[in-house]
Each structure stands twice: as structure tokens, then as C-alpha cells.
Amino acid sequence: MDIKKMIQDMTLEEKASLCSGADFWHTEAIDRVGLKAIMVSDGPYGLRKQEEIINNMGWAKSILAVGFPTAASLANSFDRDLVHEVGNALGDECQAEDVAVLLGPGINMKRSPLGGRNFEYYSEDPYLAGEIGAAFVNGVQEKNIGTSLKHFAANNQETRRMNASSEVDERTLREIYLTAFERVVKKAQPWTIMCSYNRINGRYSCENGWLLNKVLREEWGFKGLVMTDWGAMNDRVKSLNAGLDLEMPDCHGETDKLIVKAVQDGTVSMETLDTTVERILTAVDRYYSNKEENASYDMEAHHQLARKVADNSAVLLKNDGILPLKESQKVAIIGEFAETPRTQGGGSSHINCFRIESALDALKDNPNITYKKGYVAEKDEIDETLLSEAVAAAKEAEVAVIFAGLPDSFESEGFDRTHLNMPESQNTLIREICKVQPNTVVVLHNGSPILMPWLSEVKGVLDLYLAGQAAGAAAVDLLYGKANPSGKLAETYPLRMEDHPAFLNFPGTHNEVHYQEGIFIGYRYYDKRKMDVLFPFGYGLSYTTFRYSNAKLIVNGQSVSSSSTNAASGQNTGMDVIPSISAKPDDTIQVSVDITNTGDVAGKEVVQLYVKNAACEEIRPEQELKNFAKVTLEPGETKTILLDLDARSFSYYSMQIHDWYAPSGDYELFISASSRDVRQRLTLHLENERKLPFYVEEMSSCDDVYNYANDPSPLDAMLTKSGFTDTSVSEDDSMGAGTAQMMRAMFADTPLHSILSFSSDKLTWEDIQDTIRAINEKQP
Ligand code: BGC
């Protein structure tokens, strides 16, 4: 396709018509110049392709497809390769179904566990979300199918999602809410980005030139097209100038007319419109140039992949030696979710699964199973008959396994949750069963954290999250040890709803939501406040145990430190502390660590690397995840894991230079099995030659000058002249026991302009101005 020529041949009206969809799911075609349309479709963890639209809201039954585990499950796998494989599979499905762009992944941060759409997002941690997102996008796009990274940006709630303004400072935006997008753009170049419904600091994302043109395109180098979320268009002309290319769905020609008028009156330049058209044509061209004729895929094979992903994503939260179960054990399976598992969330990501494999399906050949429904999922009412049947069956068995969790009505796109509770009918069922059966296991189906008031009464908890159409089969694999649990939590489970960082400001009022917790979301908050949690970020058990040993720092290829003793598996004790070594931010810095499977079954461990910069002038989290790896080990096997760090791993976003900055100083590197289970520790001294600029002004304090000025000697001279250096006090003059201390502190904090008030009459205003000038002349 000769894109440039096609643009030249188009009329203004034709160009404008391309800037909005032809219908709910297609771009415009222009037969006159030989331009075809492309189709976009939700997911993203399966195809929600709608062949015919029934009404304006786009409701229609979608084709039968494979429902993979949702984003929240997938992130728990901490497995880039597996996520990449899912992307590949979905790319093949899109090729077979003539879908050019898969609308996802959603990578917004889980600011609050109450977010209704959290099951569609990966994590509370931007590094993890960015890495999983990049693996997914690369997987799909390798198949010459586009993705649409969404929802850009700061779209972290469903309440008033189409007009709420996320009031958030730039450092927080950069370090938390934009980081995952930046990582995916830089590592995977998604074909498209979906701009969110909400406003950011008062301006609609779709009209935000700073966000779309400056940050996304200029700074991060995004090459693709930006489309609106469905119905997110507000001011078409402003948005075009801000870098928003495609409005979705169609606008019945209305906003196209506004574009024509704006070009005619000069509000939008022809060059801007041509750039937008070129981006849209590039997506169309990429698709048709690489379209596989007669593509097909094997649904059954993808079902098996969905099962493998669910096996590798589920998180074993508790196991008092009860799991894995033995086939010979007499087990009472209880709960409607064992019969009809909750596999996904509600809303635009909802897949019409071609098959759902329940736990009962997977257990059909096991003669030692009894099943009782126990509760009706969609009704939060205790059904006494179902309850007493379930209790009786549990009493008769050796073990009770209760399939429980959140029903659809408790979490979905479109509304936020108002509490973290499971239905009381299910909590009651679990408690009643624990009274008669000491060997009780709970298998959970939930898209975001819940409270577990019965946790101390049960012996095991396996959290599937929303694990896709093979969820039931995966549960059975894991319960019976055919698969070994290896997922770790991609978010923190708080002890109480009131504990979570955004509690006071979620979902906001009067169309504004203030992100007052700043950079402290998820574990960054709980760690800083030293709060206990129900389950920490990065936590998950296995049927085996792992030893971490021999941690080393490798700088520019040279191993510079090593440890001598092994940390005890599963314990915080016995940690190795290694002497600090020095590096520069641009050095190649790697951590290597040996992981040994010390149990007697094969297993997978997620090794997590956190960085702490304790002595920074800026407030920083206690630790931040900067790399991870998932390693598979046979019993007794040891593998050496290598984890890279880069300048960004040590940096915060400095509002002074509007850039990332890695301050010189000491850093601790934690090699951990969860955010609260440090197994090995290394220290590193970083020396950054780049210094932050410091310019003295009248309100700079004496201490600022002494701490940051290249040469503070002009201040020495001025202070000597002023006599202000004499802070001695006699006991008689005392204004209290701390007078001397107070005087020193006041001296340190005194701004230069105030020295005049406390000096001898030799000091003049000109002296102060001369001193400021002299110090600044010596600054870089
Ligand atoms: C959702 C998007 C989705 C789009 C199309 C919107 O309501 O926010 O995630 O891709 O609809 O269905």
C-alpha cells in the first residue's frame, strides 16, 4: 500500500471520515482509493468478536472462543514466557477470525482493591504490570496482529469513569501510573493505545497534548495510533491537536464534519490531519500486508494452554500439610463454583467460552468424591437445605474442599466494590463445615482481594483468581498435586478494607478523585507504615521448598562480591549480608543467586529482586520491585539466576529536573520469596556523576547552601561579617532546656534574606545579593 500516495489522493472529507470508526468495531473503508477497513475486538484474554450488533450499546452475542485466565490471574504467574505464549495463541485466533487489533491488555494500576475492573488489570506494581504487559503485546504482535494498550491513563476506578478527574501530581503519575505504559511502549511498541475515559488534573486524557504528544510520542517514542475508549470523545478538534487519532465507535459523521471545518478555518493544520491519517493507514497496511490466508487454530490445544496457564497462576495461600490430596481420600466437594466455576469478570472482556471445564468434570472418574452445592452463587442468602446437606457430606468425608468466592454481581466493569467481603452465605457455609470437618480446604474464585474471616479455621486455601475456562481442571491438577502451585500475589491482601492506601480518597467526590496517597500504593504503602497485611505482595506457597544462596553482585561483567552461607528456606533468618561495593548508574549491574529445590517434588519459584534507597533526600518507598524470574527446579536441583538492574532501577522522578534521577548513596538489594520474605541481601554504593542543579536564592537556607553548593565559601565570609555565627547561649538566657539545640536548628534553617534581622549593622542587603551571585557563579 502506498500510504503517502493514498493520502495525497484523498479529499479533506475522506481524510476526516477515517478519524472515526465505520461502526462499533471497524475502521472506515474508502473504495475510491482502494482502502479497506480493519476490525478491532475485545478481549483481551479471549476473543469477544461480535458478528452483528444488536443495539447502540454494542450488545450482541460474541462468537464462541477460548477464555484464558484473566489479567489478574495471569500476572500472578510472574511468568513472562507463559504470558508471551498466551499472546501468541491469541494472535493466531485473531488471524483466523479476521481481527486486526485485539483491544488490550489493560495495565492500569490497582490503586484500590475496590476497583471494579481490577480483574482486568495486572498489579499494584508498575514494574510487574509493565513486564507482563510487554510479554503479552510482543506475543500477540509477533503474529502480525495489533494490540491496544489501555486505558491510558490514571483510569483506576469505575465510579463516574467517564468524567471523574484523577487529581494526581507528576511524580506520582510518572513513578506509578505511567511507568507500566512506558515500559510496554519501549519494550513492545503496541500498534495502538486506547485513551481512557477520565480526566487527569481536569483535562480529558483524549485531549491531553502533554500526555499524548509529549510524553507518549516525544519522550517514549510511541509510533502507533491512539484511539479513544468507546465513547470517550469530548472535543474532537482539541483531541486531534492533542494527538488523538481515531474516535471509536462511529460518530455518524458528526465529529468528522467538525474536523473538516477546523481544517478549513485553520484550527487544525492539514499536516496534523495527514499525520493522523497516516497512522491509521499504517495499521491497516500492517494488517493486510501480513494477513495469513486460510488461518485457523486448534481450540482444544488452546483450552489446554488455558489450563496450563491456570495451573501456573493459582496462588496457594495456606497449607497446613493438607495438600496435595490423595486420589484415595474420601473428599466432599462443596460449592456451586465446583459445578460452574466463575472463570472471568463481567463487561467488555467477557468471553463466550466454547467449553467450561469444572472441577466436577475433572473429577468425574474419581469414585471417592461426593458433591453438594452448599449455596446459590448469585443469591447472598443462606439456603438451609443446601447448607445442611453440605455439612452432612463434609462430616462423612475425610476432607472437605469448598469452592467459594465472589459472584459476578460483586465485581464487574462499570461499578466499583463497596466492601471486600465474600457473600455471607458462603462465609457461613465455610464456618459451619469447619465445625464438623477439621480437614477443610477453600478454593477461591475472585478477581481482587477479599477478606477471609475463617482463615484460621481452615487448613488450606488455594486462590485461583478468575482462571479462565479450564479453571476447574486446573483446580483439580493443583489440589491433587498433578501440578505444583507456583503463582505469587501480584497485589497485597489487606487485613481490613479501611487499611488500604486509597481508602480515604476512593472513589472521590464531585467528579474529582484526589490521589493523596501519592506514590504509596500497594506494598509501598503497607511497608512504609509497617502495617500487617493478610497476605503480602509477591506471596505464594509451593508443595516444595527453595533455598536461596550465594548471592553476588556483578558489575560490568565482573563478579564483585559473594556470600558464604545459605539462608534457611522459608525463613527470614540466616540472611547473608555482603559488604557494599560501588558502581555508577550506567554500569551493567546484575545480581546472581542460586536457587535450590530442597523438597521432594519438582516446583517453580518466583525470585523477586527489590531495591531500597534509604538515605535519599526525597521520600521513597521502603523497597520497590525491580526484577523477577521464575525458575523450574527438579528435587535437589540448583540453578543460578541472573537478574539485571539498570539506571531506572535506582531512580525516582525528580521534579527539579523533570527527569529520572538515581541519587548517589547506599542501596540495599533484597532477593526475596515475597515482599515480606527476604532471603538474601546485597548492598551497593552508587556514585552518580550527574548532580542535581542547585541555585541559591534569597529564601535558600544556610544549611541548603552548605549541603548543596559547589563552593559555600562566600556564605562563610558573609556570616563572619554579620556576626550571625555566634549561636552560643548562657544558661541564664535559656528559653528552655533545649535552647542551644534550638539555636543551632534555627541557624540551619534561616533563609539568607533573614540573616539581616539577626546580624550586626555591618551587613547590608547588597552583601546578601553579592553572596548569592558569587555562590551561583560557581554552580555547574
Ligand atoms: C471499555 C474498553 C473496551 C471498549 C470496547 C469500553 O467500555 O472500557 O475496555 O475495549 O469498551 O468494548
Image: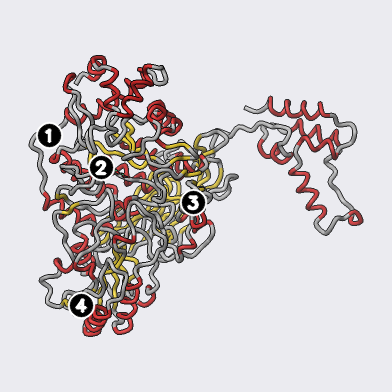
Going from N to C along the chain, the mark reached first, 1 or 4, is: 1
Going from N to C along the chain, the mark reached first, 2 or 4, is: 2
Measure the C-alpha gap from mark 1 to mark 3.
48 Å
Residue at numbered disc 4: 331
Mark 4 residue type: Val
The reply to whether the C-beta atoms of the residues labelled 2 and 3 are less than 8 Å apart is no
Other-residue count near label 3 (Cα within 10 Å), few / some / many at <14 / 14–19 / ≥20? many
Q: Residue at x 85, y 43 (%)?
A: 726
Give the label, 3 or 4, closer to the camera. 3
Quarter of the displayed picture in which ligand 1 can be seen: top left
Other-residue count near label 1 (Cα within 10 Å), few / some / many at <14 / 14–19 / ≥20? some
Q: Residue at x 49, y 37 (%)?
A: 660
Q: Is residue 433 above or below residue 756?
A: below
Instruction: Give the quadrant of the C terminus.
Output: top right
Other-residue count near label 2 (Cα within 10 Å), few / some / many at <14 / 14–19 / ≥20? few
Q: How is the image coloured?
A: secondary structure
Q: Mark yes or no: residue 549 visible.
A: no
Give the label, 2 or 4, closer to the camera. 2
Going from N to C along the chain, the mark reached first, 2 or 3, is: 2
Residue at numbered disc 1: 292
Mark 2 residue type: Asn
Determine if the C-beta at disc 2 is less than 8 A from ligand 1.
no
Percent from the top left, x then y, of residue 49?
Answer: 19, 44
Going from N to C along the chain, the mark reached first, 3 or 4, is: 4
Residue at numbered disc 2: 56
Give the label, 1 or 3, closer to the camera. 3
